[in-house]
Image (cartoon, grey):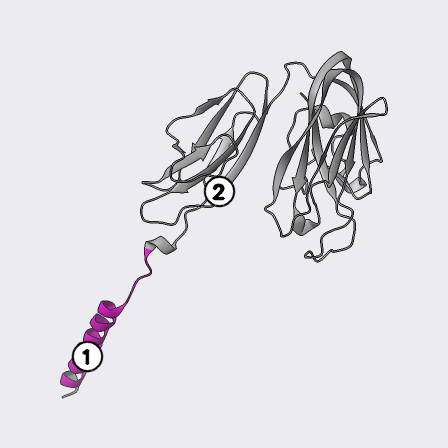
Amino acid sequence: MIKRIFYSIAIVLLLCQACISQNTEHAPTALFQLSNPHVQASSIFFDSYTMLNFSIDMPNSIIKYTLDGSSVNQNAKVFSEPLKIQESAVIKAKMFHPDYKESDEVVLEVVKIAKNSAIKQVTIKPEPSEKYSGMGAMGLSDLKKGSAQFAGDKQWMGFQTEKITASLQLEKNSTVNKIVVSVLTNQSNWIFAPGKIEVFNEGELIGERTFAKSEQETPNSPTFVHVPVSTGMYNTLNVVIHPLSEIPAWHQGKGTTPWVFIDEIIIQ
């Protein structure tokens, strides 16, 4: 009798489990998003070329990319082999898979530089924060890029002030048409891109660029800021970096002076 009851209970449980299995609905794979592709350049700064490569960690996935800063869509080029990049480029890439949601877009910028740096000497005022002193003023021309993880990265110089002036002594009669400043955005840590950058030669304004305040939080990333200047031959330049006047109203630090982080100034 006891055995009969035991077997009856076991059969009922098996039937219930079968019913549950048949009625279970699995979430469609299209709801799951792919992880971001990994993009690597042999060098961020280069005088001849740099090699660009992507790593794919999902079978049957493809990576599509652009080199001109435009957004990636289904019509973008498909990555098949390492790319030889011979000019400055803003690379954007996404991973695609037939069964999953496409990844977020990743961005990497590489910069072509003169074979021999035109910068002989750099002085900077005011001094950076003791906590984020970087590699000193000459570290701004060593062509070593800081990472997005600024804590402990000795390349970054951090400032919390109204104005930063980098005075550049150039090789004699250097031809210049653009200044590139490498800055960091990490708004959750109160680090914002500048509000304006000006370039002077012997007191004369030869180039400037103004940037709009961000209306919402933007992704953490190192960014190159390009400032065109009047093409000419120069011996000295003053690059004046103006932080935002205050942190925007949407941020928890609203109304206070933001941090500005820089790690490189490039002459083009």
Which label lies toward us, 2 or 1? 2
The one of 178 and 50 positioned closer to us in this rendering = 178
Q: Name the residue located 64 percent from the left edge and 51 percent from the top edge.
A: 215
The amino acid beneath tag 1 is Val
- Residue 73, horizontal then vertical, whole percent: 42, 40
The amino acid beneath tag 2 is Glu
Residue 72: image tag = none
| Pointer 2 or 1: first along the chain | 1
Residue annotated with mark 2: 105
Decide: is 13 above or below 24.
below
Q: Is residue 235 magenta?
A: no
Q: Which region of the structure is painted magenta?
A: 4-28
Between the residue at mark 2 and the residue at mark 1, the CA separation in whole angstroms equals 51 Å
Question: Which part of the image, by quadrant, shows the N terminus?
Answer: bottom left
Decide: is 40 above or below 10.
above
Q: Quadrant of residue 5?
A: bottom left
- Residue 248, horizontal then vertical, whole percent: 71, 53
Residue annotated with mark 1: 12
Inspect this view and state whether residue 66 appears: yes
